[in-house]
Amino acid sequence: MAIIQLSDDIRGSLEEIRIREGRPLEIIYRSQYGFVTSHGKVSLNPQEAIHPTREDCAKLLDVLTNHSVYSYEEELRRGYITIAGGHRVGLAGRTVLEQGRVKHIRNISSFNIRIAREVLDCGKKVLPALADLDSRTVHHTLVISPPQKGKTTLIRDLTRLISYGFWGGNMDMRGLKVGVVDERSELAACVSGVPTFDLGPRTDVLDGCPKAEGMMMMIRAMSPEVIVVDEIGREEDATAIHEALHAGIRIIASAHGHDLDDIRQRPVMQHLIASEVFARYVILHNAGGTPAVHEVYDSRGNRVRW
C-alpha cells in the first residue's frame, strides 16, 4: 500500500489519513497537506494521487469493523470508530434516519483516520500553572482548542504526570488518584479494559462510557481525587461536573473552541464559565503536531504567569 511506502520521516509524523472513494488519497503531517502517489511519494497535485475505489473502501470498512459491520452499529450511528492504539476513524456516507435521528451510516465513502500519539512530558511545562498548592492538588482546569490541535494529547499527559506526582519544580506533592472517563477510547486506548497509553500508576479508566454517566460512576465507585474527561459540552456533562465539585473532586476537561470568547457562545459552557467552575483555562495552539500552550487564564479571565 502506498502509505507504507512513504518515508519513515513522513509516516512518523502523520496526523491524518483521508480516504475518499474516487478522490485523491490525502495525508496531513506536521500540519502540512499532501496527496499520496502510487509510488509512496507526496505531491501537491491531486491528479498524481491514488484514487481509492469502492472496493478499497469496502475492504477498509470490513477490516475496521473486524469483519462484522453490524456489531459496530452504535459506532456507525455516532460517525466514528476507535481502533486499537486510540486512533479514531471518522466516517461519512449516506445516513439512515429513524424519527429524525441518525440510526446508521451506509454507503460509507469517506474515512478520516486520525493518528493518536503519546507525547510524553508535553504537559510538564504548564502543570505548575495548574497546581493548587494550598490544597495540594490540581485546579479545576478546562483545555480549549480547535479540533486536531492537541487537547487530547495534553490532558492524557497531564493525567500521567498527576498520577505519578511529577509536578515539576520544587513542588513536594504526592501523586493523586485519577479517574478517566474515556468515552471515545482515545485517552487510554484500552485493549480488553487495560490502557495501552501510560496514564500513571494511580489511574482508573472507564472505557467507552458516556461522559456524564461515567463521571457519576467514578464518584460512586472509585473515590478519585481528580476526574479527567475529553470534549465536554452537553447539559448532562455540566450536571455531572457540578456533582463532582460537590464531592470535592477536581476536574480536568477539554472543549472545542478557539478561545474563551468562542466557547462562551455555547449555553452550557457559558453557564460553567459564569459560575466560575474552572479555576484555570488553557488555550492551545499547534506546533507541528505537538500541543503547545498559548495562554493560561484564571476563573475571572486574568492571564496566569508561571
Image: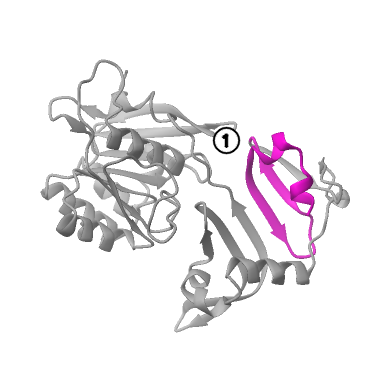
Q: Is residue 305 left or right of residue 77?
A: left
Percent across and percent down for residue 3 are 74, 49
Instruction: Report the colour scheme.
Output: one colour
Q: Nearer the viewer, residue 105 or 146?
A: 105
Q: Is residue 262 left or right of residue 41?
A: left
User: Does 131 lie within the magenta span?
Assistant: no
Residue at 25% x, 54% y: name it. 238
Decide which of 230, 197 is in the foreground and name it.
Answer: 197
Give coordinates of residue 56: x percent, y percent: 75, 67
Residue, disc 1: 289
- Which region shows up in magenta? 1-30
Quadrant assignment, res 220: bottom left
In the rendered structure, the answer to whether residue 217 lies left or right of residue 37 reads left
Question: How dense is the environment of label 1, judged by Cα within 10 Å: few (below 14), some, or many (20 and up)?
Answer: many
* Residue 275 vs residue 226, the one in the foreground: 226
Residue 167 sits in quarter: top left
Q: Could you say whether the residue bearing mark 1 is in a helix, strand or loop?
A: loop
Which amino acid is tagged 1? Gly
What percent of the width, then of the height, locates residue 61? 64, 69
Going 52% across and 42% down the picture, which residue do you hit?
A: 117
Q: Is residue 30 above or below residue 71?
A: above
Identify whether 62 is placed above or below 184. Answer: below
Tell me the quarter of the picture where residue 50 sits. bottom right
**Which residue lies most toward the bottom here?**
99
Q: Give the quadrant of the C terminus.
A: top left
- Along the horizontal axis of the image, is 200 left or right of 90? left
Q: What is the x, y in percent for residue 253?
A: 33, 45
Q: Residue at x 53, y 77 (%)?
A: 104
Q: Quadrant of the N terminus?
A: bottom right
**Viewer can see residue 285:** yes
Say if 151 sits above or below 107 in the image.
Answer: above
Instruction: Please say whether residue 5 is one of the residues in the magenta stretch.
Output: yes
